[in-house]
């Protein structure tokens, strides 16, 4: 076994979902951040556990052909872009491998794997960003937390965000510092200004500025509203979200519109979509449209089928399929998202969609008892995957096809395995990169009812 502080030479042969390279030292797997497959490196062992160890790079002896020059000044401190040190081609290969490994090794399944859908744009693609605030050297700053910590790395120009976000951030920070508005301290629970939260319609260009505060300070923010709207013509909404709780949860339940509209709008798969501060909306619009197109291809509705859309958010997936279905039934637990979904359907003259608020398993169970018998079920669960109750209810509903969209291939493989044990074949899987340069990867899964 390797020992702590041992320095050794090894070749990196794999890459994990967390962006760490993998090598073997004395027969034990060692995980080494910031490395690439093919690196020959001098590695210092920093932690040894029972079956694996962690190391850090002392020196790259022979660099991998996958390595590229990093262009972000805070890449190593921030930890958001885990894969910025390798080419995008290598990143797609890695993520495709993660998806395939999840279904074959974790799930023990043998689906057909469609070609991985990489992104056309790897920078400035996000339509949403939430920046925590802190005080450093006596001034308010914003940025992102370093990995596994609440130590703030100051950032205003993030390569993944639209450039205008940086300009807005500097304007807001300048106002906070000029007016000496207090910044929230999560240790003591004191201070007012907690987060700067920005959203932008990728197609519309409309921008929402949401200021997360500990208590109502609308009077102190009125001059900021004037400053922002005079400086940025694309701002259509300025909202104050009030979160009085001593928690690391970013948003509170109460929103107050300080200027403009309560929402902004965008276009998703040809439908106009209304976006509120609390509604879920995929952060990479262009890639999400490709993801939804793949989901529609897998669902293959014939125009006469009922589609149940579980964990539907603001209804974007179901509404993208509405023209090819007889009816869409959406279920979502966040009330504001359900209201957004209803308004999205109305604004697009979609009359064959209905949306229900509540836990996916619980509400779908009630709908089943009321006679809801979908031919196709689309499910887009959170990272933890579907609850056992939801898996059981989906199987009991016996739809012809199930299309699962997942941000976690491991839980998707687990849930697909459970459904395969309940009479479904796992036919196809397609990996999709919604978050270039980060360690995240999505997948779409097609399951069909076993004719036997």
Image (cartoon, rainbow, N blue to C red):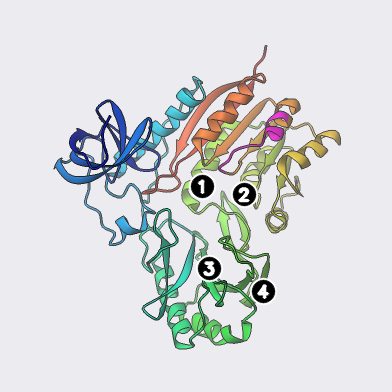
Circle 3 crowding by C-alpha within 10 Å: few under 14, some 14–19, many from 20: some
Circle 4 crowding by C-alpha within 10 Å: few under 14, some 14–19, many from 20: some
In the image, is 339 to the left or to the right of 161?
right
Quadrant holding the C terminus: top right
Name which of mark 3 and mark 4 comes first in the sequence: 3
Residue 409 marker = none
Secondary structure of the residue carrying numbered label 2: helix
Q: Nearer the viewer, mark 2 or mark 4?
A: 4
Q: Nearer the viewer, mark 2 or mark 3?
A: 3
- Let me know if residue 388 is in the magenta part: yes
Residue 288 marker = 1
Name which of mark 1 and mark 3 comes first in the sequence: 3
Give the residue at mark 4.
256
**What's the distance in space between the residues labelled 2 and 3, CA to CA?**
35 Å
**What's the distance in space between the residues labelled 2 and 4, CA to CA?**
25 Å
Instruction: Using the rendered image of the protein, determine whether residue 371 is visible from the camera's viewpoint.
Output: no
Name which of mark 2 and mark 3 comes first in the sequence: 3
Give the residue at mark 3.
186
Tell me if label 1 and label 2 are in contact, CB under 8 Å: yes
Quadrant holding the N terminus: top left
Q: Residue furthest left?
A: 61
Residue 316 marker = 2
Name which of mark 2 and mark 4 comes first in the sequence: 4
Q: Is residue 266 above or below residue 404?
A: below
Which sits in the foreground, 383 or 331?
Answer: 383
Q: Quadrant of residue 45?
A: top left
């Amino acid at each position: 076994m390797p020992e702590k502080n041992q320095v050794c030479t090894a070749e990196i042969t794999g890459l994990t979902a967390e962006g760490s390279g993998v090598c073997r030292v004395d027969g034990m797997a060692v995980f080494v951040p910031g490395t690439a497959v093919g690196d020959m490196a001098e590695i210092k062992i920093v932690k040894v556990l029972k079956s694996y160890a962690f190391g850090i790079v002392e020196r790259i002896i022979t660099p991998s052909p996958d390595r590229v020059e990093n262009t972000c000044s805070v890449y190593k401190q921030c930890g958001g872009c885990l894969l910025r040190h390798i080419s995008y081609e290598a990143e797609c290969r890695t993520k495709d491998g993660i998806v395939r490994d999840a279904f074959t090794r974790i799930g023990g399944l043998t689906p057909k794997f469609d070609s991985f859908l990489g992104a056309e744009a790897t920078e400035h693609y996000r339509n949403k960003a939430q920046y925590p605030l802190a005080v450093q050297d006596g001034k308010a700053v914003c940025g992102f937390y370093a990995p596994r910590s609440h130590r703030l790395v100051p950032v205003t120009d993030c390569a993944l965000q639209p450039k205008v976000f940086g300009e807005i951030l500097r304007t807001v920070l300048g106002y906070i510092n000029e007016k000496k508005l207090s910044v929230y301290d999560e240790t003591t629970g004191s201070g007012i200004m907690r987060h700067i939260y920005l959203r932008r319609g990728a197609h519309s260009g409309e921008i929402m500025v949401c200021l997360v505060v500990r208590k109502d300070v609308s009077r102190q923010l009125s001059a900021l509203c004037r400053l922002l709207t005079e400086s940025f013509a694309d701002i259509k909404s300025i909202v104050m979200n009030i979160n009085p709780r001593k928690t690391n949860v970013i948003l509170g339940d109460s929103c107050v519109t300080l200027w403009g509209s309560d929402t902004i709008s965008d276009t998703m798969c040809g439908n106009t979509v209304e976006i509120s501060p609390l509604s879920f909306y995929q952060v990479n619009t262009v890639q999400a449209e490709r993801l939804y197109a793949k989901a529609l291809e897998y669902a293959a509705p014939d125009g006469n089928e009922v589609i149940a859309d579980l964990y539907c958010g603001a209804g974007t997936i179901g509404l993208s399929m509405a023209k090819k279905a007889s009816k869409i039934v959406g279920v979502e637990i966040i009330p504001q998202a359900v209201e957004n979904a209803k308004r999205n359907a109305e604004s697009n003259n979609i009359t064959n969609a209905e949306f229900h608020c509540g836990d996916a398993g619980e509400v779908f169970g009630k709908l089943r008892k009321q006679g809801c018998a979908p031919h196709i079920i689309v499910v887009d669960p959170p990272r933890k995957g579907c609850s056992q109750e939801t898996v059981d209810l989906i199987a009991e509903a016996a739809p012809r096809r199930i299309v699962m969209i997942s941000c976690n291939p491991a839980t998707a493989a687990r849930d697909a395995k459970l459904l395969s044990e309940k009479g479904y074949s796992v036919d196809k899987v397609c990996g999709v990169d919604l978050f270039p340069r980060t360690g995240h990867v999505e997948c779409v899964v097609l399951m069909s009812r076993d004719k036997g």
